[in-house]
Image (tube, rainbow, N blue to C red):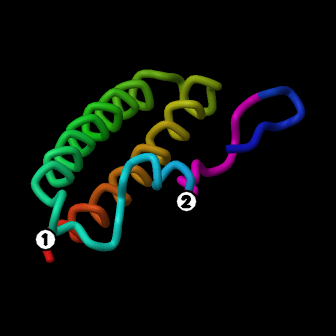
Amino acid sequence: MSFDGRGKACGRIRLGPRLLGRMNVTDDHQEDGPSLAAAVHDLNNLFGAILGYAQFIMEDAPAGSPQSGHAEKIHAAAMQGAALAKRLKLGTNR
């Protein structure tokens, strides 16, 4: 994530190899498949909640307001996280 000149967050959140390594994500999920699948399921639940609350804020906040813009960024980041979780899930179903 990057920040603009006023210190506000902007841009996309990217998970680098260091963070993915800390999550013990490997190419071979045979050994840790069930625990990884459970973790991915939990991640999906968290992203679902984040997406829902961001949607509430986007619906309630005035169009063009800072709150609406922040909620849109939260929503976009959660969508990226959900997509990553889906990729991880597909890896556990080999």
Which residue matches tag 1?
93
**Separation of marks 1 and 2 at Cα, in angstroms:** 22 Å
Q: How many marks?
A: 2
33 and 10: which is toward the camera: 33
Prevalent SS, magenta region: loop
Three-letter code for the amino acid on which mark 2 is drawn: Pro
Residue drawn 41% across the image and 22% down it? 60
Classify 90 as above or below 25. Answer: below
In the picture, which quadrant includes the C terminus?
Answer: bottom left
Residue 41 location in percent, x, y?
A: 17, 46
The crowd level at tag 1 (other Cα within 10 Å; few <14, some 14-19, many 20+) is few
* Left or right for 33, reference 51: left
Query: x, y percentage for residue 7?
Result: 81, 27
Residue range (magenta): 8-17
Q: Is residue 42 above or below residue 6?
A: below
Instruction: Give the secondary structure at mark 2.
Output: helix
Residue 92, image x, y percentages:
18, 66
Snapshot quadrant of residue 31? bottom left
Q: Residue at left 20%, top 38%?
A: 45
In magenta stretch: residue 54: no
**Crowding near the residue tagged with mark 2, few <14, some 14–19, many ≥20 C-alpha atoms within 10 Å:** few
Which residue, as the protein is rendered here, is positioned at the far right?
Answer: 5
Residue 11 within the segment the image draws in magenta: yes
Q: Quadrant of the N terminus?
A: top right
Determine which residue is flagged by label 2.
17
Up the image or down, 78 lies above or below 71; here it is below
Sequence order check, earlier mark of 1 and 2 = 2
